Image (tube, grey):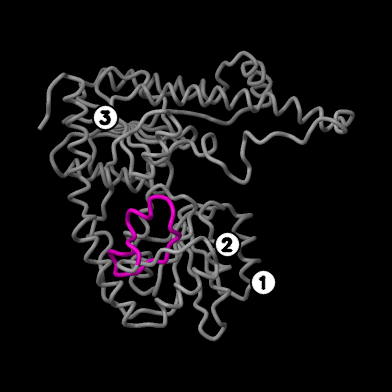
Amino acid sequence: MKIAVWHNLRSGGGSRALHQHIKGLAQRGHTIEVWTSSEGDSKFLDVDQYVTKTHVLPLSMETRIRDGYWDKWWAMQFEPETRIRRMLDFCRRCADEINAGDFDVLFANACIFFSMPYIGRFINIPKALYLGEPNRFLFESSPNLIWEGLPPASGNWKKADYRDKYWEDIFKIRQARVRVREEIYNYHSYDKVLVNSYFSNENLLRAYGGAGEVCYLGIDASLFPFQNLPREPFVMGLGAFFQHKRPDLAIESLALIPEKTRPRLVWVGDMGDTVYVNKLKELSQQRNVQFEPREKIPHEELIRLLNTASCLLYTSTLEPFGLAPLEANACGLPVVAVAEGGVRETVIDNYNGLLVNRKPEEMARAVERVLTNSGEFERLSRNARRLVQEQWTFEKAIDRIEDALFHTIGKERGVVVK
């Protein structure tokens, strides 16, 4: 196949998944070109050795004050805001080049700004999308739910600041409704939408009114080797330094372990919010937990940590899939994880890890169980490696994505691909 890949990703799980797919498809002889924006992160993706060319087209999503005034005007008419208009223009430019390139299929990936990418609207060849998750800001509840109403107007209407909030709320909700409409339109522009778990597929159905197709990821054993190193009494966390990854919950949980045996927490993230990291440091000092945040460390250091830690504590909120538990398992590291989201499809309770409720006391007991019982650790570690080798291999993941792209072409051309 001659494959056009489109993405607008920065560092993180989405980029790691795409790197895996591009590497595997290229090794099987497929020709690949990549299109992305100047807002994306081609350096982190690092696929130049596998692709014919990476096209980086200019895109600016910064807005000025006057753009805000126009956005309010457009919102009242149910028209797209400035950032959507810029994305539409960017995608048209990408599509013009892709459509002229004699490609067999478009393999689109997520957008850091809008999740459901707009590129599908403008492509006239078969097109598949690999979507990590729907736009959680629009379709999920959260501590700052966009649809939550203001306090009742009675008693507040005489206050100038309330009147300002009232009108801002009208503009904000109108803009959100336009985004929802546009994202649903984008979903229907693809011939096939692929997702990373059955949990993600259910979210897709709830958000966009239609299901996708589960196409599991895998682990490249050459990148996550088991080195059989001596284990040290520390716990690892993996995930960006943002609230939804919940490193604060990991700190609160470890604080419940007796001080004499309390492990330190080494949290590795590819990006972060400096203000939030400082709050985590304050919390760890208050709870007397040794907290070591490490951002964007070399891959070799990550592998060393995964091979010397005694437990991975996975606290992410409704993680769609979560590569981290499987990467840890490949290195022989058992996982203690919250039993929600796609993690329930990769972590088998009491086999390659322990699943618990989102309660610090349960997490603390599970971590103690792994750290203090050497026989239990060895059993979970051995099972973890076996599970990755049998069910979650890199080769099987590439089989799945290759079959999905072949079927996308067959569907569009009216050919049944066996």
Residue sitting at x 70%, y 34%? 149
The residue indicated by pointer 1 is 286
Measured as percent of width and height from the top left, residue 324 is found at: 37, 58
**Where is residue 50, by image quadrant?**
top left
Marking on residue 225:
none
Residue shown at the point (33%, 78%) measured from the top left: 376
Residue 342 position within the rendered picture, expressed as x and y whole percent measured from the top left = 38, 50
- Specify whether residue 198 is painted magenta: no
Question: Which is nearer the eye, 63 or 149?
Answer: 149
- Is residue 258 placed above or below 53 in the rendered structure? below
Residue visible at 42% across and 39% down? 203
Residue type indicated by callout 3: Ala
Identify the amino acid type marked 2.
Asp
- Can you give x and y, in whole percent of width and height, for residue 46 in the image? 32, 46
Mark 2 Cα-neighbour bin, 10 Å: few <14, some 14–19, many ≥20: many
- Between marks 2 and 3, how big is the CA–CA gap? 40 Å
- Which residue ends up furthest to the top in the rendered image? 77
Of the two numbered discs 2 and 3 in the rendering, the one whose residue sits closer to the viewer = 2
Q: Residues within 10 Å of mark 1 (few under 14, many from 20)?
A: few
Q: The C terminus is located in which quarter? A: top left
Q: Earlier in the sequence, mark 3 or mark 1?
A: 3
Q: Mark 2 highlights which residue?
A: 248
Q: Is residue 313 above or below residue 98?
A: below
> Which of the two marks, 3 or 1, is nearer to us in this view?
1
Instruction: Say which residue label 3 marks.
Output: 4
Magenta stretch: give its range.
328-349
User: Is 341 positioned to the left or the right of 3 in the image?
Assistant: right
For marks 2 and 3, the one nearer the N-term is: 3
Q: Secondary structure at mark 3?
A: strand
Rendering quarter of residue 310: bottom left
